[in-house]
Image (cartoon, rainbow, N blue to C red):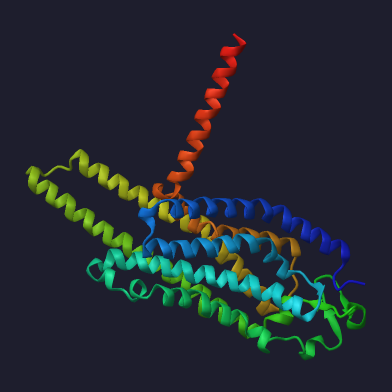
């Protein structure tokens, strides 16, 4: 007898795979295209792009782990070691992705805010150390449950195995060395609160703050350019060039705003809904949890792809390859038509 109702568990897994497999495949393929584009172009072999390459690798790993992250919300029958790996590894990849994203935004933020000291950043002087900073702390924090910070032997689990559908005796859940595996057994509430409000939310606010600051600085520089342009032209009316600059800036603001709304808001909603149910200690529909988790985490994983696909240098090799394949196809088609005639 399983820890969860068999039909509910299977239907939940099917829903997860139905939503995440296409999304995961798209994320993996898009990351591979950008990674190959950076590797192919030697002009992009510099420290800023190495940081972005690290982010792409983290995003690629997140895409691979994407189908397994919503599974953390389902109670399954696993051994202790398998349960820990199933929860710790996806959490590590997610935190590493988030920290890499903060590092990339910070590096580009300094490039705009303080360009004179940009090349003297410690990240540029010691790139291996910067990689350790963005990969080691997530691994250490995510591994804390494996070193004892968990609810595996807590009093709530001595008599039964909690399920979203029913309460099953622990004697029925344990067989062949397996037991009920749930995120509540792996992650204590304090661990979840610390991760959400001590790591994830500050990181997201930091990224939003740096992006807003860059847009503000860009707006000030645009005003200076327009002022100089008017002084050179000796006119009081805005020229067509100024209108084009203002329109480009407006498009940039709209693009950034839509990206934030589309990529971050779904995850923020999912995160706070999870915390609300965790505080109230109430059961909620597994379907709701699956849809919110897949949408929230998947949309967040798209952020590096938006940054990468917007840069033509990253996508130029893939574009040239597609163009060559299209030209070959046209030649073959024209040759076949001539032979037929």
Q: Position of residue 21 (x, y in %)?
A: 68, 54
- Using residue 337 as the reference point, say whether residue 233 is left or right of it: left
User: How many numbered circles are shown?
Assistant: 0
Q: Please report the residue visible at 57 percent of the width from the left and 60 percent of the height from the top.
A: 60
63, 221: nearer the viewer:
63
Residue 217 appears in view: yes
Above or below for 47 versus 167: above
Quadrant of the frame with the N terminus: bottom right
Q: Position of residue 155 (x, y in %)?
A: 79, 91
- Using residue 143 as the reference point, say whether residue 53 is left or right of it: left
Quadrant of the frame with the C terminus: top right
Q: Position of residue 52 (x, y in %)?
A: 44, 62
Above or below for 332 versus 204: above
- Using residue 230 as the reference point, say whether residue 132 is left or right of it: right
Residue 258 appears in view: no
Above or below for 168 versus 13: below
Q: Position of residue 243 (x, y in %)?
A: 24, 42
Residue farthest toward the top in the current orientation of the protein: 341
């Amino acid at each position: 007898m399983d820890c969860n109702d068999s039909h509910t568990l299977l239907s939940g897994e099917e829903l997860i795979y139905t939503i995440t497999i296409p999304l995961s495949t798209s994320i993996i393929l898009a990351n591979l295209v950008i990674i190959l584009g950076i590797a192919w172009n030697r002009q992009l072999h510099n420290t800023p792009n190495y940081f972005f390459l690290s982010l792409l690798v983290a995003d690629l790993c997140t895409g691979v782990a994407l189908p397994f992250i919503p599974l953390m919300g389902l109670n399954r029958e696993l051994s202790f070691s398998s349960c820990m790996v199933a929860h710790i590894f996806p959490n590590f990849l997610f935190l590493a992705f988030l920290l890499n994203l903060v590092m990339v935004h910070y590096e580009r933020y300094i490039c705009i805010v303080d360009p004179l000291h940009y090349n003297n950043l410690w990240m540029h002087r010691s790139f291996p150390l910067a990689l350790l900073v963005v990969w080691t702390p997530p691994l250490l924090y995510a591994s804390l449950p494996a070193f004892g910070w968990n609810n595996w032997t807590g009093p709530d689990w001595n008599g039964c195995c909690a399920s979203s559908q029913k309460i099953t005796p622990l004697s029925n859940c344990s067989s062949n060395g397996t037991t009920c595996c749930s995120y509540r057994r792996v992650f204590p509430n304090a661990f979840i609160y610390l991760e959400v409000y001590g790591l994830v939310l500050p990181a997201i606010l930091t990224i939003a703050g740096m992006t807003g600051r860059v847009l503000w600085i860009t707006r000030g520089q645009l005003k200076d350019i327009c002022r100089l342009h008017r002084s050179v032209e000796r006119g009081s009316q805005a020229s067509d060039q100024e209108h084009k600059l203002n329109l480009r800036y407006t498009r940039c603001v709209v693009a950034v705003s839509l990206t934030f709304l589309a990529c971050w808001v779904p995850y923020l909603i999912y995160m706070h809904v999870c915390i609300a149910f965790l505080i109230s200690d109430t059961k909620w529909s597994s379907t709701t949890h699956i849809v919110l988790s897949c949408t929230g985490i998947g949309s967040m994983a798209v952020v590096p792809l938006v940054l990468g696909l917007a840069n033509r240098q990253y996508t130029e090799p893939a574009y040239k390859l597609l163009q060559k394949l299209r030209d070959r196809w046209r030649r073959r088609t024209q040759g076949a038509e001539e032979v037929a005639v």
